[in-house]
Image (tube, coloured by chain):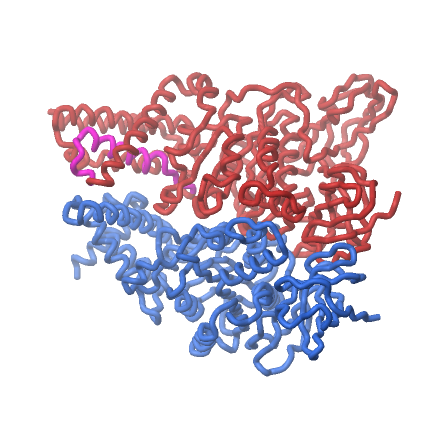
């Protein structure tokens, strides 16, 4: 092979002249320090490479070596409870090698190759194996069993199988022979190109909700397992906070959290908090089910572009084992900006606001990799994608928000005005929507009873009504409204403050089970109906507000513990008794 | 062998293009000697084979196609560092201008720095007491945080920054390990002088490193100033274990310099003509704040930026807000009412606050009080909006109470003297006192237990007095 050398350098983009030895999307090593790069453009004269590390000090004439394979990640036990950069290099190992500041060209293996894993074999000699089939299992963390699968493109007869025991990552545990008589060794790991989605047997409808314990998300705008959601919001509206809450409490088996071009201190906060937080379902630290990918805003921009794909590939890998995976990407706008930056260096013709014309198709490709599926091994798994969007100037008409809206089916719009009033989560109940509601309707009816949907619709209608009444109040004040409309405003206030507002720092309120959410709605609506009767008798509503019933309901989220739902009966009784006196 | 390259091929703004250059590395510093004997520095920003593009820091005035001799230095932009740098005054590119001679370098560091490994970071939790009620109570500054001041031309951001420096008490820091790095980018001479004098009066001048790129200094040098400043700060914090407060003013001038450089390079512009990588570029500065494991020192940043036309959605404040951990927003209306510091409460925020306050740091009721003050003040704004339509007279009794609360809150809580240093207890108590002018049922963000302690007590105290 010819010796290829650098010709030109412009920021993270490097060019090589007069060569035909590279393929599109091939992974290459650039310079003496072997910086990782990827081929992103080829003409007969110049091959263009984006480099995933700082290019300071590179010289024309430095070597560029191809690897013959596209940019890929190593998949095997040791991924969970780890923290990687955008191209799956473990940051802890880099720290050991180069200290607190990340130096370039760090050559570390993605996964620990020396660690001994306890392997339980699921196959014997003579078995016919297909792509995706599970041949062994490894207890990766106390709650996650790692299932080793035959790479999707491979199939054949087992000709060798090792006994159960301790093996390292690259040890061969089985050998299969394919139809052509070719022997393939199966180890504890496999590689997969990050820009290609992993195959599945079938895609299933999104009919099961991802339960988050966040009232406004579960009740008003639910997301399905395998669904896609966008959280757009200006700075300070709580995108990251919402993503953290979802990562902590949603009922997925595995969480992949991608910090894409965000703050370093936020990642250290996640590390800090998740290792202390105990998952209520398994009684184990949250880190036992979490993978972090941290490519902070000051880390190389090209690796930021790759980090989203690295994350989704890891998510798909665990989905194929039969797990429900939720991936949070914070923030996809930074990823889009990385695309824009590289596109600018390539002098491509820009479309809207300097973003490349292929932005929508890249976003579509990414969100399409979510979904609930029947995996090749026959198990059911899902990848739920939740992407934060950081619109410039909080303007939702900008290209990233608009295009994301087209490819996601839940839209949790964060509102600056709510955030200013410290109403968290600052999800605007008028602008947000969920398209999954009809898909999930049967599940809710089956598991929470017919009333749940009924309550939800009433709550939603009251909020809508309040919103139009507020238009009038803004002009003439609330005093002039008739009592029945005052009641709507009063009830809506209880819904907003007592139900939609949720305190992430309160030990009870940070996660609320669906059953409690339902009972809360029940009590609020019960009060509303009862007061309606009072108002119908032309008793002034001020006499009701004096009783403090509305205020009591706004605080019930704190006053009623999650495990004492019978207290709601007392609340209903109290409402009935107090109002009965008024009606006498 | 050292080669001088004679002449240049093309000149465009601050960029020169040279041909036939061999052995050059990306981001390398070059020395350009003019025929009158003066020297200029430049940085290689693009390489195409033997054709290179060099950014000249001092500008290209008087450079012709023939009158230069350029020499490659073989290294990227480096900053000489030593403990003696404390107390010195440097220009925007880190060269001494105080007449005290060169800095004898103990080590040299690349001014671009290297990113801190996220796993090596320590999550910042120790609060800095600034003695300013609005900041301490509602947007608490945390050691290792980056908290910018969003201001506008003609507002009192400089006074506020000076007051913070003068009053800031960092836990674990005393006069021996506390220092300030001050980077001026495109500010007037008087402003720089004002800061110098204020540092002198408050007795910290001997522990300040000043980097001055004044408004008439070369624009391209301005893009280096914050990088030099942060390189100094990182050295002092992580090698000499000091607690460093970095003040960078004015980030707007910095971003404008970047835009000028970008457009002369012919790059595709993003919003408002700023380069598409403005976010990454700003992040490479702001992310250099923080604390790292096994090092007692810290870098805390207070960047100041003037929002063009007071517009918070302008790309510079907008992108800054996405990177920094909160912001302190100043408000022209408050300033017009004579309130100092004119901190606009609602859009201001400190993201790290929640973990650095409360029991063991400030006081157990701090978070509850802050939540309630924000919520109640938001209602004041609603009531004012209504009053502006229907008149204050027509408001409901409760809205009138909010209007009264709003006035008191602005006049007593936000407003405080330039030399007034309030302790955290004073600020918190003042907050409860003001909240107690509202009916107790309006305080819906606070647990009853906390209210019993603070709300009732205040009432009782008043009765007693």
The residue drawn where x is 18% and y is 34% is A481
Depth order, front residue of A327/A63: A63
| Residue A496 x/y as whole percent | 32, 36
A484 magenta-colored: yes
| Residue B279 x/y as whole percent | 55, 51
Relative to B91, say whether A322 is above or below.
above
Q: Is residue A370 left or right of residue B407?
A: right
Depth order, front residue of B320/B208: B320
* Numbered range of the magenta stretch: A477-504
| Residue A2 x/y as whole percent | 88, 45
Q: Quadrant of the rendered structure where residue B1 is?
A: bottom right
Q: Which chain is blue?
A: B
Give the main secondary structure of the magenta stretch: helix
Q: Which chain is red?
A: A
Residue situated furthest front in the rendering: B65
The residue drawn where x is 68% and y is 43% is A87
Depth order, front residue of A566/B163: B163
Q: Quadrant of the N terminus of chain A?
A: top right
Depth order, front residue of B312/A358: A358
| Figure label count | 0
| Residue B260 x/y as whole percent | 57, 60
């Amino acid at each position: 092979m010819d010796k290829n050398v650098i010709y030109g350098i412009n920021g993270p983009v490097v060019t090589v002249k007069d060569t035909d030895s590279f393929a599109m999307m091939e992974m290459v090593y650039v310079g003496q320090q072997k910086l990782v790069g990827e081929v992103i453009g080829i003409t007969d004269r110049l091959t263009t490479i984006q480099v995933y590390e700082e290019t300071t000090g590179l010289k024309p004439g430095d070597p560029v070596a191809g690897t013959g394979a596209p940019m890929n990640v190593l998949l095997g036990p040791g991924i969970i409870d780890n923290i990687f950069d955008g191209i799956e290099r473990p940051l802890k190992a880099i720290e050991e090698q180069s200290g607190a500041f990340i130096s370039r060209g760090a050559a570390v293996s993605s996964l620990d190759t020396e660690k001994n894993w306890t392997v339980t074999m699921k196959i014997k000699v003579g078995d016919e194996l297909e792509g995706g089939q599970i041949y062994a299992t490894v207890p990766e963390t106390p709650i996650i069993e790692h299932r080793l699968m035959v790479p999707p493109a491979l199939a054949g007869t087992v000709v060798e199988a090792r006994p159960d025991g301790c093996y390292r990552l690259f040890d061969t545990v089985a050998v299969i022979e394919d139809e052509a008589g070719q022997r393939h060794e199966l180890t504890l790991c496999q590689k997969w190109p990050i820009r290609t989605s992993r195959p599945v047997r079938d895609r299933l409808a999104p009919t099961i909700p991802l339960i988050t314990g966040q009232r406004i998300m579960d009740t008003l705008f639910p997301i399905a397992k395998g669904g896609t959601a966008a959280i757009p919001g200006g700075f300070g509206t709580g995108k990251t906070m919402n993503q953290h809450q979802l990562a902590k409490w949603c009922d997925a088996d595995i969480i992949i959290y991608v910090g894409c071009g965000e703050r370093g201190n936020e990642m250290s906060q996640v590390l800090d908090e998740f290792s202390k937080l105990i998952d209520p379902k398994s009684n184990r630290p949250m880190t036992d089910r979490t993978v972090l990918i941290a490519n902070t805003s000051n880390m190389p921009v090209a690796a930021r572009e790759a980090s989203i794909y690295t994350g989704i590939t890891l998510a798909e890998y665990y989905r194929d084992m039969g797990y429900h995976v939720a991936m949070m990407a914070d923030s996809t706008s930074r990823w889009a900006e990385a695309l824009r930056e590289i596109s600018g260096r390539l002098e491509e013709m820009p479309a809207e606001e300097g973003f490349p014309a292929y932005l929508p198709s890249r976003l579509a490709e990414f969100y399409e990799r979510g979904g609930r599926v029947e995996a090749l091994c026959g198990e059911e798994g899902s990848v739920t994608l939740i992407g934060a969007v950081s619109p410039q100037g909080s303007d939702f008409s900008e290209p990233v928000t608009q295009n994301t809206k087209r490819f996601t089916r839940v839209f949790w719009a964060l509102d600056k005005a709510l955030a200013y009033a410290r109403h968290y989560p600052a999800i605007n109940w008028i602008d947000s929507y969920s398209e999954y509601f009809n898909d999930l309707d049967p599940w809710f009816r089956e598991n929470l009873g017919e009333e749940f949907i009924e309550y939800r619709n009433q709550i939603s209608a009251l909020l809508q009504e309040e919103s139009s009444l507020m238009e009038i109040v803004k002009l003439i004040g609330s005093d002039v409204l008739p009592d029945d409309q005052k009641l709507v405003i009063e009830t809506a206030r209880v819904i907003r403050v007592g139900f939609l507002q949720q305190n992430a720092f309160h030990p009870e309120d940070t996660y609320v089970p669906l059953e409690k959410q339902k009972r809360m709605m029940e009590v609020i609506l019960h009060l509303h109906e009862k007061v309606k009767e009072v108002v119908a008798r032309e008793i002034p509503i001020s006499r009701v507000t004096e009783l403090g019933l509305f205020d009591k309901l706004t605080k019930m989220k704190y006053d009623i513990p999650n495990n004492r739902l019978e207290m709601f009966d007392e609340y209903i009784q109290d409402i009935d008794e107090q109002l009965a006196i008024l009606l006498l | 062998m050292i080669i001088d390259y004679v002449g240049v091929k093309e000149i465009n703004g601050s960029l020169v293009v040279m041909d036939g250059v061999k052995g050059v590395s990306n981001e390398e510093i070059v020395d350009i000697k003019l025929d009158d004997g003066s020297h200029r520095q430049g940085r290689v920003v693009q390489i195409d084979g033997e054709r290179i593009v060099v950014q000249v820091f001092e500008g290209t005035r008087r450079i012709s196609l023939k009158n230069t001799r350029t020499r490659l230095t073989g290294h990227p932009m480096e900053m000489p560092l030593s403990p003696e740098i404390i107390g010195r005054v440097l220009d925007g590119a880190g060269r001494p201008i105080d007449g005290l001679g060169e800095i004898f370098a103990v080590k040299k560091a690349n001014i671009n720095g290297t990113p801190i490994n996220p796993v090596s970071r320590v999550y910042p939790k120790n609060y800095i007491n600034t003695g300013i009620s609005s900041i301490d109570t509602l947007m608490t500054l945390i050691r290792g945080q980056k908290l910018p001041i969003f201001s506008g031309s003609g507002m009192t951001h400089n006074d506020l920054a000076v007051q913070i420096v003068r009053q800031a008490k960092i836990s674990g820091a005393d006069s021996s390990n506390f220092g300030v790095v001050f980077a001026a980018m495109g500010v007037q001479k008087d402003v720089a002088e004002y800061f110098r004098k204020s540092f002198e009066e408050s007795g910290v001048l001997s522990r300040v490193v000043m980097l001055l790129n004044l408004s008439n200094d070369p624009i391209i040098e301005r893009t280096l100033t914050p990088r030099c400043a942060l390189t100094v700060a990182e050295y002092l914090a992580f090698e000499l274990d000091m607690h460093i407060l970095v003040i960078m003013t004015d980030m707007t001038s910095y971003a404008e310099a970047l835009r000028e450089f970008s457009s002369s390079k012919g790059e595709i512009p993003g919003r408002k003509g700023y380069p598409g990588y403005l976010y990454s570029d700003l992040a490479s500065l702001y992310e250099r704040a923080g604390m790292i494991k096994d090092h007692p020192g810290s870098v805390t940043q207070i960047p100041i930026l003037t929002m063009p036309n007071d517009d918070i959605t302008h790309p510079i404040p907008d992108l800054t807000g996405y990177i920094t951990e909160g912001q302190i927003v100043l408000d022209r209306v408050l300033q017009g009412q004579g309130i100092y510091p004119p901190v606009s409460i609602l859009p201001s925020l400190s993201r790290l606050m929640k973990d650095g306050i409360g029991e063991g740091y400030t006081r157990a009721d701090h978070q509850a009080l802050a939540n309630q003050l924000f919520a109640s003040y938001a209602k004041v704004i609603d009531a004012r909006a209504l009053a502006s339509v229907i008149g204050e007279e027509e408001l409901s009794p409760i809205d009138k109470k909010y209007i009264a609360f709003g006035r008191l809150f602005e006049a007593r809580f936000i407003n405080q003297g330039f030399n007034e240093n309030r302790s955290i207890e004073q600020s918190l108590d003042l907050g409860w006192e003001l909240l107690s002018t509202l009916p107790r049922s309006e305080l819906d963000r606070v647990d009853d237990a906390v209210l019993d302690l603070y709300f009732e007590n205040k009432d009782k105290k008043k009765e007693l007095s």
